[in-house]
Amino acid sequence: MTGQPAKRGVAAVLGAALLTMPAAAADDLRIAYLAATCAGCHAPRADAPADPAADSPMPALAGRPADDTLAALKAYRDGQRPSAVMAAAVAGLDDATLAALARHLEATSPPNRPNASGQPGAAP
Amino acid sequence: MTATRQPFTATRRRVLGLAMLATGVMAVSARGATPAPPRIVVLGGGAGGAVAARTAKRLGGEAVSVTLVEAAPSYVTCFFSNWVIAGLRAMEDITHGYAGLAADGIAVVHGRAEAIDRDARAIRLATGETIPYDRLILAPGIALRHEAVPGYSEAAALTMPHAWKAGPQTTLLRSRLEALGPTASIVMLVPPNPYRCPPGPYERAALMAHRLKATGRAGARLTILDAKETFSKQALFQEGWERHTPGMVQWLPPSVHGGILSVDPATNSVETGLDVFSGDLITVIPPQQAAPIAVDAGLADPDGWCPVVPAAMRSPMDSFVHVIGDAAKAGEMPKSAFAAASQGRVAAVAVLADLLGWPRPEPRYFNTCWSLIAPDDGVKVGALYGEKAGGIATVKGFVSQPGEPAAERRRAVDEAENWYAAITAEMFG
């Protein structure tokens, strides 16, 4: 019979390590998770055009300027830009979270294309 | 563009450094050797499993080992297979390989899993090989309960195709549709809830009728014998069938046909409580349940589906196992590829948080089901879901409305195509 995972030595030691973990790092997993949910519709495309809004109802987000993304996300959330899907997708997310998400997406590069720091990147 | 922010990977390296150091301390004291990272095994390489495996590897990096066990060397998506049946896509368009997962550093094992040994925490393959896990993400999909329709069987499915698992059955239904005459009659049996892809049968009816009409066979008739009194996006489909293929699709609920009693492949007929329906083509979508490997492992309820704890898609029967996708009872979420992928991300992040001592983000379950009513007429239904009263329930939903402008319907088709590109990129790289 299997039950609850035992709180083994590893958990205790990890717990000790977490006490020193920067708060920003803990938040990063949350933001990375949120960015991954975007990828459910917004495909990372190497051939995405320079103006992502021009080509698709679900533009590629990776590498897009954070200010643009943040403005769009807030407009969807607040009902200033009509999209039932996006209104649901961002419902309940506060400004700080949306800003962190927009920065994360900007820092993520499309496949086969250098990101802002010149390094090849991964999908959001 | 100037780089002022580091991507997640840079910060993650810092966190992982701590995590690896911590596990290192533990393992060195225990074995005096380099520690092996915790093992995440994903069973099933569909939308849920493939997304779970890739999410776990992308966010967990070298701190975890990720193994995907999948019997098939390539995957044919059930989503968009209605497009293939209607001649809008080819089989190769919906067939994908797993090379991208291997390139990510995921160990891809193409073997048939025979059993889950929950006490030993290992998967046993048909070859006898065992694959141990620290956490198992189970994404086994559905089993078709052929026997639930008297007269139907796996053998009968060669005469009366279901095409509810994509592959040879998809090709069979397509070729049978192509071979029909100008006044052919088709009968489609649709199962009770819950089943994979709730709007799927009705989209299929619309696209089969479209194909018949577009190839000079507008005199053909398709009768749906449903096990339900109502269905997903009903007003939209009924309006759409009449607009695009007037008189060709007829939908009958049990209150009209009297209930489905049996099928007979020898005479190509269906007996209901009030009538006998015969056709040139009969397609039977049988009732379903979670795949046998989940049921045999004791992870399913008596109804044949696997319950889950909403916060992490974890099994209430076994804390080392998470169940995602069509096999899971995910509250108000439908059984769709979109939902499975959403659950796959939640399970992957929950497992990482659990194994590495990271804080677990609150899940944001999401789904959208697009359906074609015609090649240029798309509709959708979807929602954001959250944990409510111990279950997964709608937070904010949306659905297309009857009478929308053509441009909006065309846009939904574009969205569906974009989504297909996105989810297959997320699954396969």
Image (cartoon, helix red, strand yellow):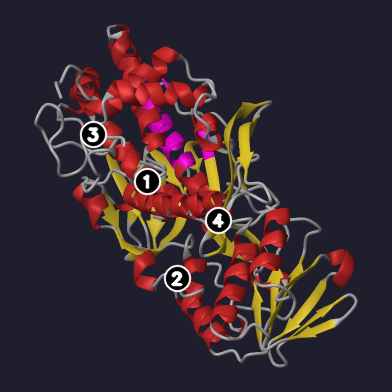
- Mark whose residue sits in front, 2 or 1: 1
Same chain shared by disc 1 and disc 4: no
Residue at horizontal 48%, vertical 20%? A93
Under tag 3, what secondary structure?
helix
Q: Chain of mark 2?
A: B
Q: Chain of mark 4?
A: B
Per the image, the residue denoted by label 1 is A56
Under tag 1, what secondary structure?
loop
- Mark whose residue sits in front, 4 or 3: 4
Residue at horizontal 59%, vertical 89%? B180
Per the image, the residue denoted by label 2 is B88
Per the image, the residue denoted by label 4 is B378
Is residue B285 shown above or below A42?
below
In the displayed structure, does residue A117 sit left or right of residue A23? Answer: left
Per the image, the residue denoted by label 3 is B61
Q: Which residues are magenta?
A: B342-366
B50 or B290: nearer the viewer:
B50
Mark 3 to mark 1 CA distance (whole Å): 31 Å
Q: Amino acid at mark 3?
A: Gly
Q: Amino acid at mark 4?
A: Gly
Q: Earlier in the sequence, mark 2 or mark 3?
A: 3
Mark 1 to mark 4 CA distance (whole Å): 16 Å
Residue B101 location (% of width, % of height): 26, 51
Same chain shared by disc 4 and disc 3: yes
